[in-house]
Amino acid sequence: MALLKANKDLISAGLKEFSVLLNQQVFNDPLISEEDMVTVVEDWMNFYINYYRQQVTGEPQERDKALQELRQELNTLANPFLAKYRDFLKSHELPSHPLPSS
């Protein structure tokens, strides 16, 4: 089943907004863990899904399909962001020093 044009437009708008949100993030101190950043991004994604849930149109199955596609696309945008954050955390790790032997 093809998505309704109105739902495609909503998904497109949501993806643009989410991309802007991700691109606005500045990584600095205090750093949060990778797991906490995943939680933050998942919360943002849920916010977008809930916001657009009220705006998608069509029969229930069409609405569900649109929201499922939105979630998949948001996840696709989130993955490179999370990888970038993971790399950022790795670049800020303190070098480990071996303990002196006794």
Image: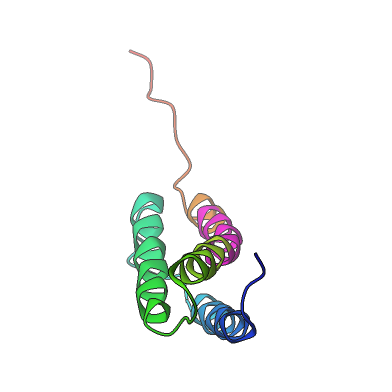
**x and y percent of residue 71 in the render?**
50, 64
- Above or below 39: residue 58: below
The chief SS type of the magenta part is: helix
Q: Which residue is drawn at 41% across and 52% down?
A: 34
Decide: is 15 above or below 69: below
Query: Which image quarter: residue 52?
Result: bottom left
Which residue is outermost to the top?
102
Residue at horizontal 48 percent and vertical 54 percent from the top: 89
The mark tally for this picture is: 0
Along the line of sight, which residue is nearer the eye, 50 or 3? 3
| Residue numbers of the magenta segment | 73-86
**Left or right: 18, with 51 as reference point:** right
The one of 91 and 27 positioned closer to us in this rendering: 27
Color encoding of the figure? rainbow
Instruction: Write the residue at 56% across / 81% down.
Output: 7
Who is closer to the viewer here, 80 or 68?
68
In magenta segment, residue 79: yes
Vertical comparison of 23 with 45: above or below: below
Where is residue 42? Give x, y as percent.
39, 61
Q: Quadrant of the N terminus?
A: bottom right
Image quadrant in which you'd find residue 47:
bottom left
Residue lying at the far front of the rendered structure: 59
Q: Nearer the viewer, residue 30 or 58?
A: 58
x then y, percent, for residue 3: 62, 73
- Is residue 35 shown in magenta? no
> Residue 102 in the image: x percent, y percent?
33, 12
Horizontal side of 69 relative to 41 (left or right) equals right
